[in-house]
Amino acid sequence: MGQCEAQVFTGITAGLFAKLSEKARVAGIPIEGASGEATRMGIHFSWKYEEAEGKLTIQCIHVPFFVSCNDVNQRVAGVMRETLDEG
């Protein structure tokens, strides 16, 4: 399967990015630094956090055949909503 459409989130403070990074780490996705790539269960992600703009771009650049881009993007968006709601 190919890569999924990138998701861009705005209004992301450094504190919020730290919370998101911790959630990802707990889930087995090691996010270290403002940009990079990581793989979990055959799903390969890239991310880029631009602190000055408060912008976070997350893209699934490879999904295995048994996972859809829609499922992955919905899960990422759901984690973002949960984290924003937590404050």
Image (cartoon, helix red, strand yellow):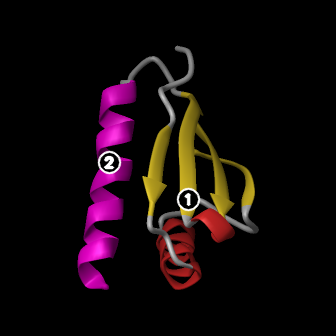
Residue furthest front in the image: 53
How would you rate the neighbour count of disc 2 (Cα within 10 Å): few for under 14, some for 14-19, many for 20 or more?
few
The residue sitting at 44% across, 54% down in the picture is 9
As shown in the figure, which amino acid type bears the numbered disc 1?
Lys
Q: Relative to the observer, which residue lies in front, 84 or 3?
A: 84
The residue sitting at 49% across, 69% down in the picture is 12
11 shown above or below 56: below
**Residue designated by label 2:** 75
The residue sitting at 56% across, 15% down in the picture is 2
How would you rate the neighbour count of disc 1 (Cα within 10 Å): few for under 14, some for 14-19, many for 20 or more?
some
Q: Earlier in the sequence, mark 1 or mark 2?
A: 1
As shown in the figure, which amino acid type bears the numbered disc 2?
Arg
As drawn, the label of residue 7 is none
Q: Quadrant of residue 29?
A: bottom right
Counting the numbered discs, the total is 2
As drawn, the label of residue 55 is 1
**Quadrant occupied by the C terminus:** bottom left
Magenta-colored stretch includes residue 75: yes
Which region shows up in magenta?
Answer: 69-87
The answer to whether residue 71 of the structure is visible from this angle is yes
Between marks 1 and 2 in the image, the one whose residue lies nearer the viewer: 1
Q: CA distance from mark 1 to mark 2?
A: 19 Å
Q: Kindly state the secondary structure of the residue where label 1 is placed.
A: strand
